Image (cartoon, rainbow, N blue to C red):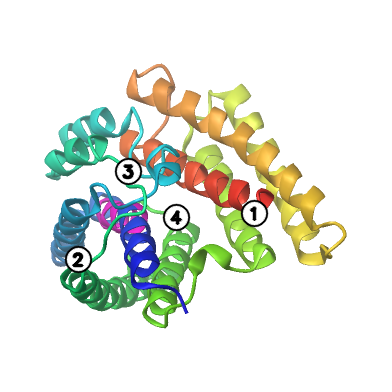
């Protein structure tokens, strides 16, 4: 059973990362619909706005509370987030609340923050709101996936991407549930965490490969190599034992850092129009933040 202080800290950190991820999922879905599916686009817009509202509330509670390791990891915002939001808004016409990003970039961390009953209650309400929202978004994503797989719906997003973002939403939901049961989500099983995020990283490499212009031979080859590396790491994580766990985690960390560097260079290249692709600038920053998040988790396991 975690203390009230840890419950609040872990809840706010989780939402800082994942509610932004969810609002961007909704935006990517909205941008991918055909003109005839304007009702689905409106539904995606609804979830984008609701997760923005949730994220804004989380940011207002987070100053002086969340840990420096989270704020310094690059999982909340990066140096590219604001610029890629502006470009993506210009490209799509979909409004993005950039004030939240500016507020996040000014967040400061806490050291043994004093948490009162009022804050605990507010976070409990945040978690309850988040669960309702995530459940709604999961149902929406599942409906879209069913429509695509039964050829009743066409979208510019890959079926695998919809499956991918569905899995991330389900993880978010389960972690909020863990926190409500006062489970320390920082002490989750390393094997389970690595299996999940290795697959996410592998699929990121596959999406990058598939969204690059066919003329970008070198980047396509590199993306494919990363996909194969993480496919191998998934197999290693499936069979790792107490003896091999440290070496597998270390190998995974090194590989994820390399992928992060590749994604960072890609984000810069896409934002400055030096890479030919159909990758939205914010999508490039989005996958970079997820790599940063995974790196922090792996470093936590290494320190145990």
Q: Residue at x 26, y 64 (%)?
A: 115
Identify the residue position indicated by label 4 in the image: 158
- Residue at the image point whose x is 28% and y is 40% from the top: 108
| Residue position for label 2 | 40
Q: Position of residue 39 (x, y in %)?
A: 14, 66
Q: Which mark is residue 301?
A: 1
Mark 2 or mark 4: whose residue is earlier in sequence: 2
Which residue is located at x 30 percent, y 34 percent?
A: 81
Q: Helix, strand, or loop for circle 3? A: loop
Depth check, front residue: 55 or 122: 122
| Residue 125 vertical placement versus 248 (above, below) | below
Answer above or below: position of 302 versus 281.
below
Q: Which residues are magenta?
A: 17-27
Q: Position of residue 65 (x, y in %)?
A: 29, 52
Kind of element beneath mark 4: loop
Few, some or many residues within 10 Å of mark 3 (<14, 14–19, 20+): some
Q: Position of residue 220 (x, y in %)?
A: 60, 31
> As drawn, is 165 to the left or to the right of 262?
left
- Which one is in front in this view, the residue at disc 3 or the one at disc 4? 3
């Amino acid at each position: 059973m975690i203390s009230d202080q840890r419950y609040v800290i872990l809840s706010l950190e989780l939402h800082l990362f994942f509610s932004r991820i969810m609002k961007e999922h909704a935006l990517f879905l909205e941008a991918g619909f055909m003109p005839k599916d304007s009702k689905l686009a409106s539904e995606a817009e609804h979830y984008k706005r609701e997760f923005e509202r949730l994220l804004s509330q989380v940011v207002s509670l987070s100053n002086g509370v969340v840990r420096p390791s989270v704020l310094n990891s690059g999982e909340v915002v990066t140096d590219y987030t604001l610029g890629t939001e502006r470009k993506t808004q210009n490209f799509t016409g979909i409004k993005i609340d950039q004030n939240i990003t500016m507020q996040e970039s000014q967040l400061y961390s806490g050291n043994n923050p004093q948490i009162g009953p009022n804050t605990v209650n507010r976070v409990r309400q945040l978690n309850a709101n988040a669960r309702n929202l995530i459940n709604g978004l999961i149902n929406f994503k599942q409906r879209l996936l069913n429509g695509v797989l039964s050829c009743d719906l066409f979208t510019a997003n890959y079926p695998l991407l919809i499956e991918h973002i569905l899995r991330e939403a389900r993880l978010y939901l389960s972690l909020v549930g863990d926190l409500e049961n006062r489970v320390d989500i920082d002490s989750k099983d390393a094997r389970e965490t690595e299996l999940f995020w290795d697959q996410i990283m592998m699929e990121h490499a596959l999406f990058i490969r598939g969204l690059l212009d066919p003329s970008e031979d070198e980047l396509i080859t590199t993306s494919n190599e990363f996909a194969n590396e993480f496919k191998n790491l998934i197999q290693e994580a499936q069979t790792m034992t107490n003896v091999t766990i440290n070496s597998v985690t270390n190998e995974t960390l090194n590989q994820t850092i390399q992928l992060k560097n590749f994604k960072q260079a890609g984000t810069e290249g896409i934002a400055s129009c030096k890479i030919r692709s159909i990758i939205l600038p914010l999508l490039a920053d989005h996958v970079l933040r997820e790599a940063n998040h995974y790196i922090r988790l792996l470093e936590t396991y290494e320190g145990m």
